[in-house]
Image (spheres, rainbow, N blue to C red):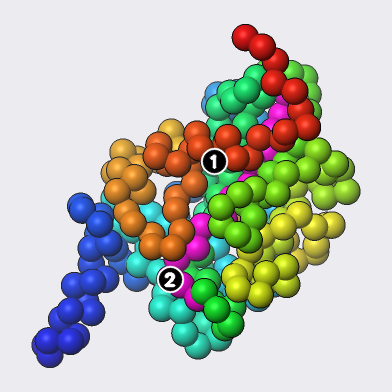
Amino acid sequence: MKLHNFIAVAAAVVTAIGAATIEHDKVQPFAQPHPVTISEKVAIRFKPSLAVEGGCHPYPAVNAAGEINGGLKPSGSPSGGCEKPKLGSQIYGRAGWHNDLWAIMYAWYFPKDDPRIWSSHRHDWESIVVWIDNPDANPPVIQAIAVWGDDYSSFDVTTRYEDFVNGSSPNIRYNSEASLTDYRIDLVFLDDSAEFQDLIMWEQLTGEARLALERTDFGDTKVPFNDATFQSRLDGAWPSKLTKRSS
């Protein structure tokens, strides 16, 4: 094997300490487990749909063995090599109480972000937070929805979400119209092309998968729901129009 080929292979094998990577279309997604807990049932109830308008479709980021998606080099067409995951797609979730509201974060992984203008990069994580009053309520009611913004540092938060929710599922679009530099997500009216992915919650992942997501450096983008990021992202997604109740 020639030296430059060996170096390329080696770079694709390890992304971070102990986190092996495999080809982007070889990652087996987790099947959506049957919900048992209230948290799991509510997470499925409010699971968003996603319409992809250009760019990659969402892919699994990690498999049960803890092997990480190696992503794609941002070259060729924006959707080149990543239009439809042949093994299936994935949406990730994590939930918990935050400032007296129940927060459900949903996240998608994309092998590349390639708007063909600026800021193209391997790997992309996008996320939303659905804020509800109480998972034990009958029924629980959405209070606000926060969508990760195109500046990659803050959320766009709205408490006026009714036109963008179908039943109990927020309608999300992934495209580059709202940002000249990146593909991003936003709330939209119901789109017939929208699809649902199998949901796997943080606590439902294998230990190997969680550890790999904690350890892996995804470059220009971060896993929004791991231990190092989750709480700070919820702080940023908090709907400021809602008053925090004193404890």
Judging by the rendered image, the residue that carries numbered circle 1 is 233
Q: Residue 35 is drawn in which quadrant?
A: top right
Other residues around mark 1 within 10 Å, as few (<14) / some (14–19) / many (≥20): many
As shown in the figure, which amino acid type bears the numbered disc 1? Answer: Arg
* Kind of element beneath mark 2: strand
Compared with residue 56, is residue 103 higher up or lower down, i.e. above or below?
Answer: above
> Can residue 1 be found in the magenta stretch?
no
Helix or strand or loop: what does disc 1 sit on?
helix
Which residue: 12% across, 86% down? 3
Report the side of 206 relative to 12 (left or right): right
**Of 178 and 22, which appears nearest the observer?**
178
Where 216 falls versus 52 (above or below)?
above
Q: Where is the C terminus found, in terms of image quarters? A: top right
Majority SS type along the magenta span: strand
Q: Which residue is mark 2?
A: 122
Q: Residues within 10 Å of mark 2 (few under 14, many from 20)?
A: many
Q: Nearer the viewer, residue 170 or 178?
A: 178
Disc 2 to disc 1, C-alpha distance: 22 Å
Pinpoint residue 188: horizontal percent, then vertical percent.
80, 57
Is 200 in front, or is 177? 177
Q: Which segment did they paint magenta?
A: 120-133
Q: Would residue 58 be seen by someone viewing this image from the given angle?
A: yes
Depth check, mark 2 against mark 1: the one in front is: 1
**32 w.r.t. 14: above or below:** above
Q: Relative to residue 71, is residue 102 drawn left or right? A: right
